Image: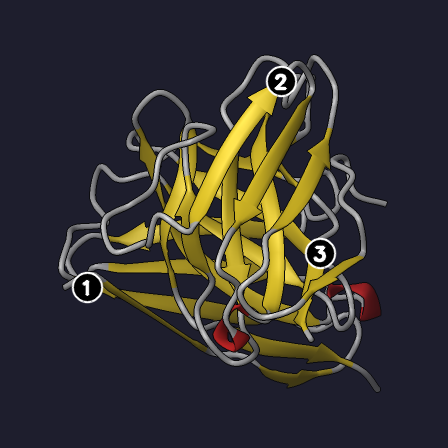
């Protein structure tokens, strides 16, 4: 059974750093397109970052230069390193596995971890 | 402001049918496949529809997807109280730095 479990969220001051983890089971993150998606309070979903099978990455403009997506194939875990955090980064962060048939879509998601940026 | 436009809310009675629209442009909906997701508070988002109109295993045929031009539609028939949730459309956007984009979400109320 495919499962994704996020952790690492919490309360952090503006300008601070946080690393989110997403532990995967039931499949290997190695060679899989993996994503982070967030949902700010009362807002819609916002795609944040993707890591491709070759470990190249692509980011939303809102986080480019501040966030880094990576994975540890041995631990079968996806990460999101978040630096220079701002109040508008406050959100529930989901990791999601990306699938491809004719188009791209997210076939499995975690339950999310809450990040609150506030002084 | 979301790249894809959805109605903020829709409602219908149990047993009835509802449709949720998702409007975009040629750089996203018009030339890329659309997927739909159901969000219930405190739970992992669930994939309902992919490739415009395909259902993953385990998703009942009460849920359907369609697309015409730059608009996509999610249909739900035989509404149940358990369908009360937020629904999002998503697709790839081919413009330079957009990546994957979502609609603003639609809150479904089953009266």
Residue A92 appears at what percent x and percent y? 61, 71
Q: Tell me: B4 left or right of A56.
A: right
Q: Residue at x 79, y 43 (%)?
A: B2
Tell me the mark number nearer the camera, choosing from 3 and 1: 3
Counting labels gives 3
Other residues around mark 3 within 10 Å, as few (<14) / some (14–19) / many (≥20)? many
Chain under disc 2: B
Residue A43 appears at what percent x and percent y? 77, 63
Q: Is residue B100 visible in the rendered structure shown here?
A: no
> In front: A46, or A78?
A46
Residue A45 appears at what percent x and percent y? 65, 55
Tell me the mark number nearer the camera, choosing from 2 and 1: 2
State whether residue B46 is above or below residue B5. Answer: below
Q: Tell me: A91 left or right of B83.
A: right
Query: Alpha carbon of mark 3 to alpha carbon of mark 2: how far?
Result: 19 Å
> In front: B20, or A39?
B20
Q: Quadrant of the C terminus of chain B?
A: bottom right
Query: Alpha carbon of mark 3 to alpha carbon of mark 1: how far?
Result: 37 Å
- Labels 3 & 1 near each other (Cβ < 8 A): no
> In front: B53, or A76?
B53
**In the rendering, which numbered label is found on residue B68?**
2
């Amino acid at each position: 059974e495919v499962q994704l479990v996020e952790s690492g969220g919490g309360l952090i001051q503006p300008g601070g750093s946080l690393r989110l983890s997403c532990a995967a089971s039931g499949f290997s993150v190695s060679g899989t397109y993996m994503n982070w998606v967030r949902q700010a309070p009362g807002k819609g979903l916002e795609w944040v970052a993707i890591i491709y099978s070759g470990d190249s990455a692509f980011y939303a403009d809102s986080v480019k230069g501040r966030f880094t997506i990576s994975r540890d194939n041995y631990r079968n875990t996806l990460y999101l390193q978040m630096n220079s955090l701002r109040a508008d980064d406050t959100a529930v962060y989901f990791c999601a596995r990306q699938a491809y048939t004719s188009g791209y879509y997210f076939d499995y998601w975690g339950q999310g971890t809450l990040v609150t940026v506030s002084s | 402001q979301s790249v894809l436009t959805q109605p903020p809310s829709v409602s219908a009675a149990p047993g009835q049918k509802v449709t949720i629209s998702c409007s975009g442009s040629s750089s996203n909906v018009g030339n890329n496949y659309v997927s739909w997701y159901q969000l219930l508070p405190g739970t992992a988002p669930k994939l309902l529809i992919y490739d415009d109109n395909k259902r993953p295993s385990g998703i009942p045929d009460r849920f359907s997807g369609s697309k015409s031009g730059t608009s996509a539609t999610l249909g739900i028939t035989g509404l149940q109280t358990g369908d009360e949730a937020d629904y999002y459309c998503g697709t790839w956007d081919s413009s330079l730095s957009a990546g994957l984009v979502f609609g603003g979400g639609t809150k479904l109320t089953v009266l």
